Every structure is written in structure tokens, then in C-alpha cells.
Image (cartoon, rainbow, N blue to C red):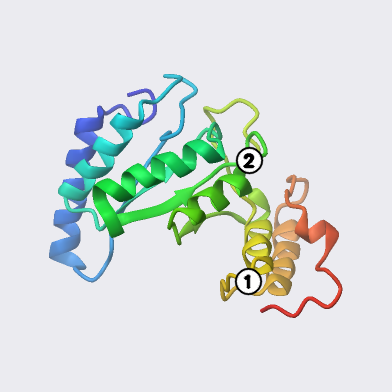
Amino acid sequence: MANVRKTREAMVEEVRAIVQIRNELAPHVKVEAGISTAFGCTLQGHVAEDDVVKLAAAVIEAGADESGLSDTTGMANPAQVRRLFQRVFAEIGNKTGAAHMHNTRGLGLANCLAAYDVGVRTFDSSMAGLGGCPYAPGASGNVVTEDLVFMLEAMGIQTGVSIPKLILARQALSDGLPGEPLYGMTPEAGLPKGWAHV
């Protein structure tokens, strides 16, 4: 209610309405319904896992193609991410969508890895970690794309994303947003000697 001024049930009906419009105008477009504050909320505090699983199932029943989980306020930890994504996979199977992690408490990459370990293959991230949640005090922003891609590639997981090109794009971002803090360790440290990935 505090975020979008709608109940969970009303938001499920919004998803149903969006799916109907999609079916009429662009049936080839996929709809993913991300469950915000799935791992904790600055207003509510603890979020019951049963509620998250039920909501993921409800948006799929309403016609969404996928339902992902979002750590909008940066409260998740790897054990929790692993457990909750496993429960969602058990409930909606291959309709389980993206992991959207924030790095508020420094666990963004660890949480992405935990999600990957249980089968998630789509991740939200942002260049230089820009973004964040205005309702999360101290929120430093989203998982840094440059660091996420480096982690996956270093593990032998091909992303198809060029880290040198990401770093070049980061410079353009810095030029366009002077004074904006840019996050990420990989651009500062550079690539290891002999790096031969994408």
C-alpha cells in the first residue's frame, strides 16, 4: 500500500489487465511480474516466504509468463535467496524469472550466486550499480553489472557480454553524470593478466 497504493490482490489484477492488453496488441511480448521486497521490507519488516510463493503463483495464474524475486531493499542473504527461489521453482517451475538483487549491505553478488546455484539464469543489474530504492536507508544501488559479469565469466559461465566494452561504456556514463558516485570493483582493479574471456 505504501509503495503503489494498492493491495497485493489489486496488483495481481493489474497484472491480469496488462496481460490482456499484451494479448490484444503484442502477443509475442513476454510479461514478467517481479515480486518486490520478497526478502524483507523497510516498512513491514519480515516478509513471510509463504506469502511470496503464493504471490508468485498468483501472478502466473493471472497470465504472467514469469515471476521473479526482487531484493528491492537489500535485505537478502544467500541462504534465504537459495531457499526462497527453490520454493518458487517448486511452485511455478520454469516460469521462475529473474533475480533482482541490491547491494545495500554488500551481499548482492553472493545473492546472485546463490540464485544461480538453484537454477536462476536471468539477473537484473545496472552499470556502476546506479539506481536503488528510495525507501531503503543507505541503499547503495543495484548489483554492479561489471562485477556480476566478471564473476560469472571468471567461473566459466559465458554471458556473451564483453567486460572491456562494459568498462568503455562506464566511461561514457561517468562523462554524462559528472559527480554521480559509480560503484564496482572490477573497473577499478582491471582484468587479471592473461584474461581471455569475451
Q: Which quarter of the rendering shows the N terminus?
A: top left
Q: Amino acid at mark 1?
A: Gly
Count residues near mark 1 (Cα–Cα under 10 Å), then give few for <14, some for 14-19, many for 20+: few
Rendered view: 187 above or below 54: below
Element marked by disc 1 = loop
In the image, what residue occupies the spot 28% across and 43% down?
Answer: 56
In the image, what residue occupies the spot 64% across and 49% down?
Answer: 129
Element marked by disc 2 = loop
Q: What residue would you read off at disc 2? A: 107
In the image, what residue occupies the spot 63% across and 71% down?
Answer: 156
**Image mark count:** 2
Locate residue 170 relative to residue 112 in the image: left or right. right
Rendered view: 17 above or below 165: above
Q: Position of residue 193 (x, y in %)?
A: 86, 73
Image marks 2 and 1: residues in contact by CB distance under 8 Å: no
Q: Determine the residue located farthest toward the top in the rendered image.
A: 44
Q: Nearer the viewer, mark 2 or mark 1?
A: 1
Q: Amino acid at mark 2?
A: Leu
Rendered view: 102 above or below 67: above
State the CA–CA distance, disc 2 to disc 1.
Answer: 21 Å
Q: What residue would you read off at disc 1? A: 156
Q: Which quarter of the rendering shows the C terminus?
A: bottom right
Disc marking residue 34: none
Residue 71 in view: no
Residue nearest the observer in this picture, 172 or 99: 99
In the image, what residue occupies the spot 16% across and 48% down?
Answer: 61
Q: Position of residue 146 (x, y in %)?
A: 67, 60
